[in-house]
Amino acid sequence: MIYRLSLELKKTRRRGIWLVPAVLLLVITAWAGRNMDNERYLDYGWLMTLFNVPLLNAILIPTAIAVLASRIIDLEHRGNTWKVLETLQRKSDIYITKVLYGFCAVLIFSVLELAAFLVLGYAIGFKGNPDWWAYGLFFVQTFVISFNLYLLQMIVSLIFFNQAVALCTGLCGSMAGLFLMYVPQWPVLRCLIPWGHFGASMFVGMDAERNHINGFYYMRPDSGCVFFITGWLVLLLVGGWFVFQQMDTDGYHFQPRHRRRRGKLGADIMDAATDDSVSLSRRPVKIPRLPVEVIKIRRTPIWIAFLTLPLISALIGTANYLNNLALLKSTWYSLWTQHSLFFCYFFMPPLIGVYASYLWRLEHNGSNWNMVLVNTPVWRLVFGKLAVCSAVTFLTLGWQCILYVLCGLYVGFSEPVPFALIEWFVCGVIGGTAVCAMQCFLSLIIRSFAIPVGLALLGGFAGLAATAAGHYYILPYSLMSRGMRANNPNLSVNLSVYICYAVFFIVLFYILSVWYIKSHDVRTQ
């Protein structure tokens, strides 16, 4: 088994797989450790860490795990090596090796995360010593829950050749986990859904009044969460084994219904299918009227994320608003901050990353570059990608605004919808187009579907840090959130300066994309 694991490690060398948990660890440590050297935090820093980190894990780990599992399984899909693997070793060995590889990756990440926070606490100067049993429990919870998510994402990546499905699942899982953190009144739901286990297993609470923190305390996790976590572990291990057993050497696919039927009825159905195919082949070919790039995203899984992520974000924002009516007094404006804050920084950037990666996916597969560059000018190819990605971003932000209005009506606001919503939306589209330009460039130069999505997730955190430092103009991600007033709806923005920065990023990454294609030989699969 050690030998097979070493082979799996060799296959993933120089593919950036280990950069995913490394960068994730860096982001979580940096974000959780910010402002912890404040004197008022030193007294309860150890407990504060155990309170804050599960929220960061719920936001970041599901998407990062989806990227990791996709990179491990997508290698076999792209090279069509399932045939070769099954001729060299048993299916059980393939399955166990994939599981063990993910087990090691998640274990290393969990150990390093625990060590990072212990070192950070001693370096900053937290008072006293940590409760070792509490940090040991935190390590076990992080490891088991993350490993469950890896098993789930591995199954999704195996079943669907198109890795957009797996990444959309991870993004929706991150949003669902965040949503369930804010609904402790639904403990059963938090236990049933594996992405909600970060919130269900929390055992540290916060004692706060308004914006003043009085301290932290230990509490009981949701009843039964241990049994649900264990049950998911067993279910996913057995389910993954079943999926591998049903997998053909060409990869996993669902068997057509007409092949399941036996006897004369099956033969008749096959004959009818053959006749239909012959008659269809005699029909004249219809040239589609839609633009080429639009055809590529028709009936694709990105529309699942398009519908689901803004919807979950709206539910989170509305629930948080209703739970804090004593603090949030500005009706529509307060509701907007709750709707847009997490969505603009943590979920819209990777969603745009999925759009951009999917648009470049077809060119990176097979020898499609050779055909595309013969028939399409480079400038038009890049413009088409950017235009369609921006159009889908426009629809996404429009869907978010519609949900915002509907949630406001549900809450019962008597005031009219603020006219400023139009400006927030327009600025969001302009800033979102800048993000599209950057993500299209990253998806062009990085052949992996998953890595640009992971970079977009990290870009959202970098944009939040840039905005907090007052330098929102240095990144497209912070530019978009600034335009949508995610932090403060009453914030004034110089529109001429804002548009100049957005146009600069759009033109810059458009030129870089054209230059890259013209100056580099294309690589095909």
Image: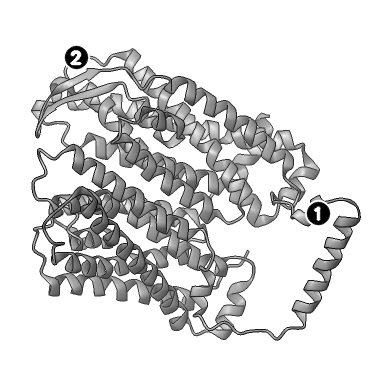
Quarter location, residue 356: bottom left
- Kind of residue at disc 2: Gly
- Image x and y of residue 452, in percent: 43, 57
Q: Of label 1 and label 2, which has the lower sequence position?
A: 2
- Image x and y of residue 353, in percent: 41, 59
In the rendered image, the vertical position of residue 203 relative to residue 340, given as above or below: above
Q: Are marks 1 and 2 in contact (CB under 8 Å)?
A: no
Q: Nearer the viewer, residue 332 or 472?
A: 332
Q: Quadrant of the N terminus?
A: top right
- Residue appearing at x 15%, y 53% in the figure: 413
In the rendered image, the vertical position of residue 65 relative to residue 47, given as above or below: below
Real-space CA distance between mark 1 and mark 2, rounded to the nearest whole angstrom: 68 Å
- Residue appearing at x 47%, y 52% in the figure: 168
The secondary element bearing badge 1 is classed as helix
User: Which label was assigned to residue 128?
Assistant: 2
- Residue appearing at x 52%, y 61% in the figure: 447
Q: Which residue is mark 1?
A: 259
Quarter location, residue 416: bottom left
Of badges 1 and 2, nearer the viewer stands 1
Q: How is the image coloured?
A: one colour
- Image x and y of residue 207, in percent: 16, 24
